[in-house]
Amino acid sequence: MNIAIIPARGGSKRILRKNIRDFCGRPMIGYAIEAAKKSGVFQKVMVTTDDQEIFDISQSLGAEVLPLRPEVLSDDYTPLAPVIQHAISSLEEAGTYYNNVCCVYPCVPLLASEDLSSSLKLMTDLGAESCIPVCEFLSAPQRAFRINDGSKISWVNPIHRLTRTQDLEKLFYHVGAFDWASRDKWMAGDLADGVAYIMANDSVVDIDTSEDWDRAEVLYRMLKS
């Protein structure tokens, strides 16, 4: 059995009320709920939050919601794993058990339900205990540099200053869209040795600032038109 858990706290700082702010006509968290429900792979789509308004909106959008989680699991410094562990433990205390748990992030307006089902299939087919979505770096990170005082360039890897981009190894980064893992893997708190599900760069968007939000709305409208 599989469950989607969407962690959505109320205290976002850079974009106030980000998880329920209107995004192209609906609360942002609605896109995560819809993608999870449409995927057809979850017996339950659950939201965990510390905020009553997020609780109410999530319920109205068709998700089930855990009782409000404690403040100690809702501040700016709380890692993801303890939040998911708390949700799993709360469900098990109520007598409900799941083999696989997918943390679906709340701000994923471009997430396709097919990515949730396909990544689960990949994890299952390969006999892995966890699966994370990744994208390829659009520019070679081996040729990154720092800008020091006085605008002076300092290369991170000087050995690659003159290396052609096409001669460098392809590298990938973790996309903050969802994370699959077995129940036991989540409870151990380490998903590091799982398998990678490669996503297209235009199917993900990282929304941390108001400028990110505006670009995400433009991209969403372009893709949906």
Image: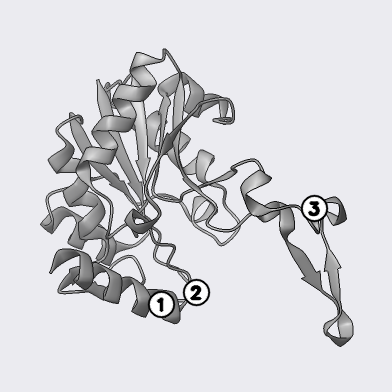
Circle 2 sits on which residue? 13
Q: Quadrant of residue 23?
A: bottom left
The first of marks 3 and 2 along the sequence is 2
Can residue 21 be seen in this snapshot?
no
Q: Quadrant of residue 59?
A: bottom left
Crowding at mark 3 (Cα within 10 Å: few <14, some 14-19, many 20+)? some
The kind of residue tagged 3 is: His
**CA distance separating discs 3 and 1:** 41 Å
Depth check, mark 3 against mark 2: the one in front is: 3
Circle 1 sits on which residue? 16
Query: Element type at marker 2?
Result: loop
Q: Is residue 91 above or below residue 103?
A: above
Can residue 200 be seen in this snapshot?
yes
Query: Element type at marker 3?
Result: helix
Assess whether mark 2 and mark 1 are in contact (beta carbons under 8 angstroms).
yes
Q: Quadrant of residue 25?
A: bottom left
Q: Position of residue 63 (x, y in %)?
A: 18, 47
Snapshot colouring: one colour
Q: Is residue 219 left or right of residue 152?
A: left
Q: Which mark is residue 165?
A: none
Q: Position of residue 74 (x, y in %)?
A: 49, 56
Task: Pick the quarter of the image with the C terminus.
Answer: bottom left
